[in-house]
Every structure is written in C-alpha cells, then in structure tokens.
Amino acid sequence: MTWLDLPADTLFGLDNLPYGVFSHGERTRRAGVAVGDQVLDLTAAAEGESFGRLLGAGVLNPLLAAGPDIWADVRVRVREWLSEPRHADRIRPHLVPRNEITSHLPVEVADYVDFYSSEQHAINASRIFTGGDDLVPANWKHLPIGYHGRAGTVVASGTPVIRPAGQRKPRKATQPSFGAAKRLDFEAEVGFVVGVGSELGAPVPIDEFPRHVFGVCLVNDWSARDLQGWESQPLGPFLGKSFATSMSPWLVPLAALKHARVPQPAQDPEPFEYLRAAEPWSLDLTLEIRINGRLVSSPPFATQYWTGAQQFAHLTVNGASLRTGDLYASGTVTGPAKDQRGSLLELSWGGREPLAVGEETRTFLEDGDEVVITASAPGPGGARIGFGEVRGTVAPAVV
Ligand code: MN
C-alpha cells in the first residue's frame, strides 16, 4: 500500500528502495532512494532525523559505515514515509523525476577487487586461450581467484570510456607494438559494497557477511584483451583493466534481496572451513547486456561457483582489513548457453566468431559503441527488484 502512484510493473517498488547519489537542479550530490519513476531526496527528507547527519556527505560512505542496525532503521522510516498517507504532504516535495537526475558514484570507493568466480567463464577463457578442453586452473575450485584493481578509476555509469593505449603483442608477432587497444571488451559483473570495515589482522568470518556488506550493484569491468594478454605474464591484470571500471548508480540493500536467495550450486571438493557458510545462498539475478540497444546476452548469476559471502570471507582470511566503500566484483557472469556469455571475448569466441549486433557484427568494441548492463531479481509476491543499469560508451583513443 502506498500513496504514491507507482507503475504496476515497476522494478523500483517499496520492496526495493535502493540508494544512490544524485543531482537535480539546485539539489547537488544528494543521497537518494529510487522509487517508481522517481527519486526521493533522502538528504532533505531526513532533516531532523537522528540519521540525517549521515546523509550530507555527497557519498553514502557515512551511512554505510553506520552499520546494519542503522541501515534497518533508515529503511523502515523510508518505507513508512512512502506508504503511510499521513506523510504524503511532507514527502511529496522531496520527490523528483528519475529521468531528470544526474547520477553520481554512490560511494567513494575505498579498495576495488575483482574475482573470477563463474566456472563457465573460466572454462571458456581457458578454451579460447589454450585451445584446451575444460581446463580451469588447479587452484580454481579451492579458492575464489581475484586481483586488486584500481579504485581511483571506478567511474559512474554514463562516463565515457576512452579506448586505452598500451603495449600489445599478437601471438604471431615477433615484437610488441604500442598503440590503441584493438580488442576492447566489457565484462558483465555483480558488485558488492562493504559498509562496515574491519581490523587489520582479524579475519572476518563468513557468517558476518550481512553485518559488513551493505548492498549490491552492477559493474562493467572494461578490459583491453590485447594489453591484458601481453602484460599479464606472469602477474595478473594491470593496465588492461585499470583504465576504467563502471559502477551502476543504485545500491540495492541486502535487505531487498531476501526473496532472491536460491541454494548455492554444489561445490566439489568441499571448500575449507572459512569458506563454508552456515546457510549458503546465491542470488537469483538475471543480467541483460545490450550493445547499441540490441540484447546480446542474458547471463544468470545464480550459478556462480563462488558466492559473494565466500568472496567476502576470502578477502580477509589473511588478516587484510576491510574499509567502508570497498567494492568487490563477482567476475564475469557467464552461463552455459551461448546467449548467456558475459563478455565479447566469449560471445565472439576470441574474435573468431563475429557476433551479430542488429545488422552489424562485432568481435570487439568499436568507437562509439554503447554497452548497457541491466539486472533484476525476484521480490516478494511476484514483484521484481530492479538494479537499474550500468552504461558506458567507447570514446576514441587519445593517441
Ligand atoms: Mn572482471
């Protein structure tokens, strides 16, 4: 029930209420909550509330740092405001049309980590690069493989992605060359944002996941495959990834995803104790990837081998600490079917099988190409929980 005029099929109903940071006219860098086709100016609406002081920073970090009891309080209050008619007159002036806002990064990103947790993606990558059969690395089923990315180049959805330049050496070339990347790619991923940090030297148990992780977003881990291939021997991804990582504007709180929980796929071998949750679950998100408006893939998140909670536990098992605003991404989400692949590397099978995009074909991204990743998940009573989108357009290299 609500006094709001919500579209019947909205992905932003009262069971979602994701948080972001937006500007609209004289409202600059406000905390906002998406509802229906509108955004609630939470910074303004919360004036006079005890938690109002957490909402004036232009980023959500103070709210995230406040912890799960405060997160629950704010969510209850926002729901009351948007549902009980006695609040309508006070709240209505704080609503603005969502299609008129400018979205910003929702958090100041502290550290950024990217994992590699889709088994099908790991298998595909192995087949594409080695021509081998189903070979994933020997460590793959024992630990969630990841690398440290570059937090300072995580950008808001809509920020142009400038084609990077760098060194590359095609397999048949005898010498490396320098220039604009020719094999620019996207990776459709799900991101987890840490609210409450932890102490250096104190591993955080896996079942503490919901007390530290605030919410979930979408991530595009843009990747220059030719730069990555030459520089990653023997260390991991570096300049082939660090030129830009796009993040969606809305953080969907874990509290909105209770109905999206599904059993985790079986793990064999059984993981080490620190990776075993008391009640393991995956999230039943369906992603959609569009290139220039054409749907090219619908990767399912539920079948990821390693869950967000396992990645969380792995991050600190060596004593490394968490910080408010840490972002860690799932790794490319890829399902078993051809139209469930989460990167062009896979969709064009290393460039050998051009992908149809409307009337055109693509092996890798061309200048001017726009990539949009969206997702939704089951909510209560048949409703869907929307994640909005992460969008980016390829701009020409500057070299
Ligand atoms: Mn990635």
Image: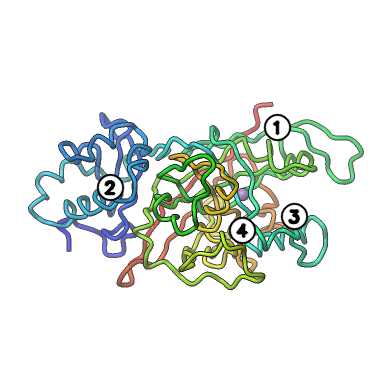
Among numbered discs 3 and 4, the one appearing first in the sequence: 4
Instruction: Give the label, 1 or 4, closer to the camera.
Output: 4
Label 2, on which residue? 70
Tell me, yes or no, if residue 369 can be seen here: yes
Q: Nearer the viewer, residue 373 or 111?
A: 111
Labels 1 & 3 near each other (Cβ < 8 A): no
Expressed as whole percent of the image width and height from the top left, the position of residue 64 reads 36, 43
Upstream in the sequence, badge 1 or badge 4? Answer: 4
**Label located before the other in sequence (4 or 2):** 2
Which of 364 and 307 lies nearest the eye of the viewer? 307
N-terminal of the pair, mark 1 or mark 2, is: 2
Relative placement, left or right, of 345 versus 304 is right
Could you say which disc has been placed on residue 350 in the image?
3
Graded by Cα atoms within 10 Å as few (under 14), some (14 to 19) or many (20 or more), the crowding at tag 4 reads many
Q: Which of disc 2 and disc 3 is earlier in sequence?
A: 2
Task: Say what amino acid the circle numbered 3 marks.
Answer: Gly
Name the residue beneath numbered marker 1.
165
Q: Circle 3 sits in a helix, a strand or a loop, which is it?
A: loop
Q: Which residue is mark 4?
A: 117
Quadrant in the picture for the C terminus? top right
In the rendered view, tell whether residue 331 sits above or below residue 247. below
Q: Which kind of residue does numbered mark 1 sit on?
A: Ala
Q: For the residues marked 3 and 4, what is the alpha-carbon distance in whole angstroms? A: 20 Å
Between marks 3 and 4 in the image, the one whose residue lies nearer the viewer: 4
Q: Quadrant of the N terminus?
A: bottom left
Which secondary structure lies at badge 4? Answer: loop
- The count of marks equals 4
Q: Is residue 200 depicted above or below 371 in this figure? A: above
